Image (spheres, grey):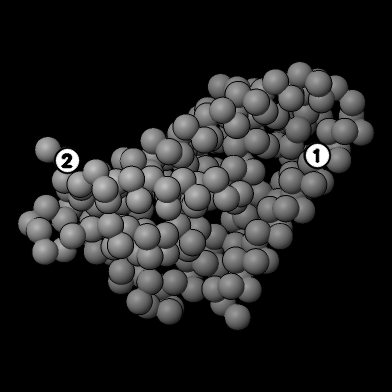
Amino acid sequence: MLPVDLATLGTFLAAAGAVVLSPGPDTLLIIRHTLNSGQRVGLATVSGVQLGLMVHTTLAVAGISVIIASSPTLFHIIASAGAAYLAWLGFQAIRGDGGVDVNGGKGKPVSAAKACRDALLCNVLNPKVILLFLALFPNFVDTARDDVTAQLITLAVILIIINLAWQMPIAWMAERIRRWLNDPAVQKTVNRATGAIFLGFAALMLYENLL
């Protein structure tokens, strides 16, 4: 018997699906690393995102997420660190370091380990994910039962499955697109565009969480 009843699972699937399908830094990072370094690295990026979700699940089960969200100082520190990391990724892309380079030119393709680490940090340092676990999950957890931890883990596993179902095809599609990106001018445009978007995410994160 599942810790979460089927009716609740159905509602959670709809809500979690809507959240996962909304564009964010994780999706952009998957596309960028796949375009730059190929499908294997793109899938490593997808894995890093899921590792980040596992970290958030552990923090939620331990009650640490609640402490972070209830402390303005801690929350602002995480928001600042997340914004700084996104800004750093953006500057990297704009200057062409780790940006799109399908011809083996000046750009430096990233390793699978670095891609996984980038995605892990990008996800863990995103305060919106913390709030996701605090705002979404409690609506589907029956605190009157003794298996609250099992319920949280079940919901987190479902969220990860939805994430994989969405993000793995993105990496596969980006690999197909990568084969047509042979024009240096196109590569430069993609680098600058993705870099600008990362900087935009960083600015938005600061605005929403610090101002």
Q: Could you tell me which secondary element the residue under label 1 belongs to?
A: helix
**Mark earlier in primary sequence (1, 2):** 2
Q: Distance between the residues labelled 1 and 2?
A: 45 Å
- Identify the amino acid type marked 1: Val
Question: Dot 1: within a 10 Å radius of its alpha carbon, few (fewer than 14), some, or many (20 or more) residues?
Answer: many
Picture residue at 16% right of the left edge, 45% below the top = 3
Front-most of 174 and 91? 174
Find disc 2 in the rendering and name its residue: 2
Residue 14 % position (x, y): 42, 48
Up the image or down, 83 lies above or below 210; here it is above
In this picture, residue 113 sits left or right of residue 173: left
Residue 189 % position (x, y): 86, 40
Question: Dot 2: within a 10 Å radius of its alpha carbon, few (fewer than 14), some, or many (20 or more) residues?
Answer: few
Q: Which residue lies furthest to the left in this view?
A: 146
Picture residue at 60% right of the left edge, 31% below the top = 170
Find disc 1 in the rendering and name its residue: 190
Which quadrant holds the N terminus?
top left
Front-most of 45 and 161? 161
- Identify the amino acid type marked 2: Leu
Residue 96 % position (x, y): 79, 40
In this picture, residue 137 sits left or right of residue 168: left
Picture residue at 71% right of the left edge, 60% below the top = 200
Residue 141 % position (x, y): 23, 58
Front-most of 84 and 149? 149
